[in-house]
Amino acid sequence: MERLLTPQDAADRLGTSLRFVRRLVFQRRIPYVKVGRHVRIAVSDLDAFIAAGRVEAETPPASPPSSPQRQSA
């Protein structure tokens, strides 16, 4: 069985507030498990949420070749 995190554990792992995790659950933006009246979040679901929010860095565009500067007369 996979390890389940409390909302507070999930918030600590994300480095966010408990309120943020509760909002994710309420808005159903992250999968969760109900254990009785308690909400638990699977570690794999939290990792998938983190991976889905990953934004890759862009490679800098190649600099255009320098053009000779014009001299004004």
Image (spheres, rainbow, N blue to C red):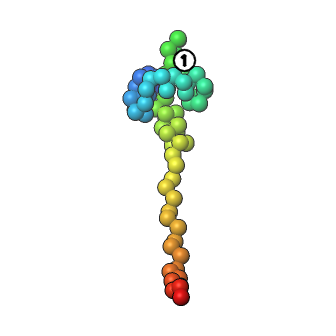
- Percent x, y for residue 12? 39, 29
Residue 14 visible to an observer of this rendering: yes
In which quadrant of the rendered view does residue 28 lie? top right
Q: Is residue 21 above or below residue 69?
A: above
* Number of numbered discs on residues: 1
Disc 1 packing (10 Å; few <14; some 14–19; many ≥20) = few
- Please name whichever residue, 33 or 18, is drawn nearer the observer in this view of the structure: 18
Residue at the far top: name it: 37
In which quadrant of the rendered view does residue 30 lie? top right
- Please name whichever residue, 61 or 29, is drawn nearer the observer in this view of the structure: 61
Q: Is residue 56 above or below residue 29?
A: below
Residue drawn at point x = 40 percent, y = 25 percent: 9
Q: Which residue is mark 1?
A: 34
- Percent x, y for residue 70? 53, 85
Residue 3 visible to an observer of this rendering: no
Mark 1: amino acid: Lys
Residue drawn at point x = 53 percent, y = 42 percent: 53
Q: Is residue 12 left or right of residue 65?
A: left
Q: Is residue 53 above or below residue 43?
A: below
- Percent x, y for residue 47? 48, 38
Residue drawn at point x = 43 percent, y = 33 percent: 14
- Percent x, y for residue 41? 49, 26
Determine whether the residue tagged by mark 1 lies in a helix, strand or loop: strand
- Please name whichever residue, 59 or 47, is drawn nearer the observer in this view of the structure: 59
Residue at the far bottom: name it: 73
